[in-house]
């Protein structure tokens, strides 16, 4: 009798393993595909191919809609081609998932700043720069030593006409991350606005 139970248990276990193995392998394949897509998105961003980055990110989000990195990257790429409304919607989704994500807060501040720089209305520009200031202050409160958040803060102060503060903050960003070419370019931009 005991042998019969062992045989039944063996059959059930074998069946379960056979039935689960394809599902497990499929999950592994899916993970590999997502990682491959993520790498492709990163490559497009590095090349400055925002349209392709947007298309790949949107495709990726159909499978993993809560990936903060992809959401923020999608927002950034949209802002770079002037789709500010879409960019803000996407980065706000990232912040609804993680309200303390410094990268998302910094990106939202950048979107507001860039939109402000492109608007002709002084009222709208001031309003957008105020929104940018609020978001970058939130980011810096969470991570005062964040080099990229400090660099964005410098650009916001520059856009607001406070060159002295902008210069002080970009110096901090350069202390935190020396030899960062983007930060050096911000410093040059600040100095050339005197």
Image (cartoon, helix red, strand yellow):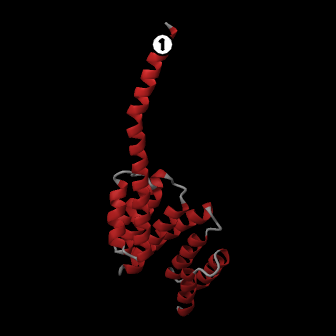
Q: Residue furthest top?
A: 1
Q: Position of residue 169 (x, y in %)?
A: 62, 78
Q: Is residue 41 above or below residue 191?
A: above
**Left of 192 or right of it: where is 70?**
left
Residue 145 relative to residue 60: left or right: right
Q: Residue at x 57, y 81 (%)?
A: 183
* Residue 128 in view in this figure: no
Horizontally, residue 69 falls left or right of residue 52, namely: right
> Residue at point 51% right, 9% down?
2
**Element carrying mark 1:** helix
Residue 33, relative to residue 139: is it above or below? above
Residue with the most extreme right position = 175
Tell me where residue 92 sits by quadrant. Answer: bottom left
The answer to which of 115 and 33 lies nearer the viewer is: 33
In the picture, residue 23 is in which quadrant?
Answer: top left
Where is residue 72 shown, x and y percent of the image? 44, 63
Which residue carries the number 1 mark?
Answer: 5
Q: Is residue 157 visible?
A: yes
| Point 61% across, 80% down: residue | 170
- Out of 16 and 114, give the one closest to the viewer: 16
Closer-to-camera residue (134/139): 139
Viewport quadrant of the C terminus: bottom right
Q: Quadrant of residue 186?
A: bottom right
């Amino acid at each position: 009798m005991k042998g019969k139970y062992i045989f039944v248990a063996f059959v059930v276990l074998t069946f379960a393993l056979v039935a689960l193995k394809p599902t497990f392998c499929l999950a592994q394949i899916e993970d590999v595909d997502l990682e491959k897509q993520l790498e492709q998105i990163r490559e497009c961003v590095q090349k400055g191919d925002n349209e392709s980055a947007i298309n790949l990110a949107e495709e990726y989000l159909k499978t993993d809609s809560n990936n903060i990195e992809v959401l923020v990257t999608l927002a950034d790429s949209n802002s770079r081609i002037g789709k500010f409304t879409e960019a803000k919607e996407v980065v706000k989704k990232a912040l609804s998932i993680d309200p303390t994500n410094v990268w998302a807060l910094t990106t939202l501040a950048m979107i507001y700043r860039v939109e402000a720089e492109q608007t002709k209305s002084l009222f709208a520009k001031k309003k957008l720069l105020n929104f940018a200031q609020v978001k970058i202050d939130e980011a810096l409160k969470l991570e005062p030593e964040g080099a990229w958040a400090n660099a964005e803060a410098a650009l916001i102060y520059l856009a607001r006409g406070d060159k002295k503060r902008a210069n002080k903050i970009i110096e901090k960003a350069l202390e935190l991350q020396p030899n960062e070419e983007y930060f050096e370019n911000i410093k040059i931009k600040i100095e050339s606005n005197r």
